[in-house]
Amino acid sequence: MTTACFVSPSPSRLSSGPASPDPKSLGRSIGRVAFPDRRLGSLPRLRSPVMAAAGVGGNGSPNATGESTVSSRIGEVKRVTKETNVHVKINLDGTGVADCSTGIPFLDHMLDQLASHGLFDVFVKATGDTHIDDHHSNEDIALAIGTALLQALGDRKGINRFGHFTAPLDEAAVEVILDLSGRPHLSCGLDIPTERVGTYDTQLVEHFFQSLVNTSGMTLHIRQLAGKNSHHIIEASFKAFARALRQATEYDLRRRGTVPRFLKRCFVKIIKLQD
């Protein structure tokens, strides 16, 4: 049996600090990851003086009133199956902090790249049957990340939607193109020369992205331009994905908070499929 649920960010569940925090505190934390405090409807001031002068909120959103009223976009999911127990939390408007313990060291390293290069705050805690292999944990972590991403995006109003980035790593280069369209599709053109990197089965790279695509409703194309070293190819893929996703989730000032109707319909379909 599989259970996946959205978890509202209540202070009692998420705070690792004392029961009565300092009211001047800027946020809550899980491990090393700090998430903005959203209690009592309070919204963080996220913009810089340059952004304020341009009428722009801290995550790139238009700010008509001159005050920053943009709340951080946070998704949290707990997924429990017979094989795994996964807890994921993502802040799309973070600072690039990762706190990941998946039981798969190489995957932890890749999720660190996702946080660092996407400027997302990423919290992942997972246990699973890794004594057999990494397949179930790899899949369920990706499914949970995709669901948390879907939740964090909300109605997607005003976002760029499209992302495109090419990342080099020494001899390797990987191009990622994505569309937060509500239509899940993966085209993965990686040619990884070895079966394993450390203990990680390299077949699981494509499976990770396929699982993430399925629950996030993302169209994702990954194309290897060059590369001979398996570690470099995979890491370049995650770096390019992080930067493309960052680009797609940031706000387009000219869109002024609108969303195309066909994208809205696709988003509603994804939500219904997961209910």
Image (spheres, rainbow, N blue to C red):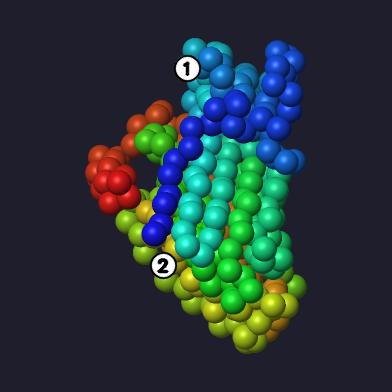
Q: CA distance from mark 2 to mark 1?
A: 37 Å
**The label number, if any, that marks residue 64 in the structure image:** 1
The picture quadrant where one finds residue 171 is bottom right
Counting from the top left corner in percent of width and height, residue 78 is at 50, 47
Q: Position of residue 21 (x, y in %)?
A: 72, 18
> Which of the labelled discs sits on residue 156, or is there none?
none
- Quarter residue 94 falls in: top right
Residue 194 in the figure: left or right of residue 263: right
> Which residue: 25% across, 40% down?
261
Residue type marked 2: Leu
For disc 2, the neighbor class at 10 Å (few under 14, some 14 to 19, many from 20) is: many
State which tag comes first along the sequence, 2 or 1.
1
- Badge 1 density bin: few <14, some 14–19, many ≥20, Cα 10 Å: few
| Helix, strand or loop at mark 2 | strand
Decide if residue 144 is on the left or right side of residue 96. left
Residue closer to the observer: 3 or 33: 3
Viewer-proximal residue among 243 and 217: 217
The location of residue 96, given as percent across then percent down, is 69, 44
Callout in the foreground (2, 1):
2
Task: Name which residue type carries label 1.
Answer: Ala
Q: Quadrant of the N terminus?
A: bottom left
x then y, percent, for residue 33:
70, 40
- In the image, 24 versus 126, the foreground residue is 126
Q: Nearer the viewer, residue 248 or 83?
A: 83
Residue on which the image places disc 2: 186
Camera sees residue 255 = no
Secondary structure of the residue carrying numbered label 1: loop
Determine the residue positioned at 50% across, 40% down.
Answer: 75
Up-down: is 9 above or below 185?
Answer: above
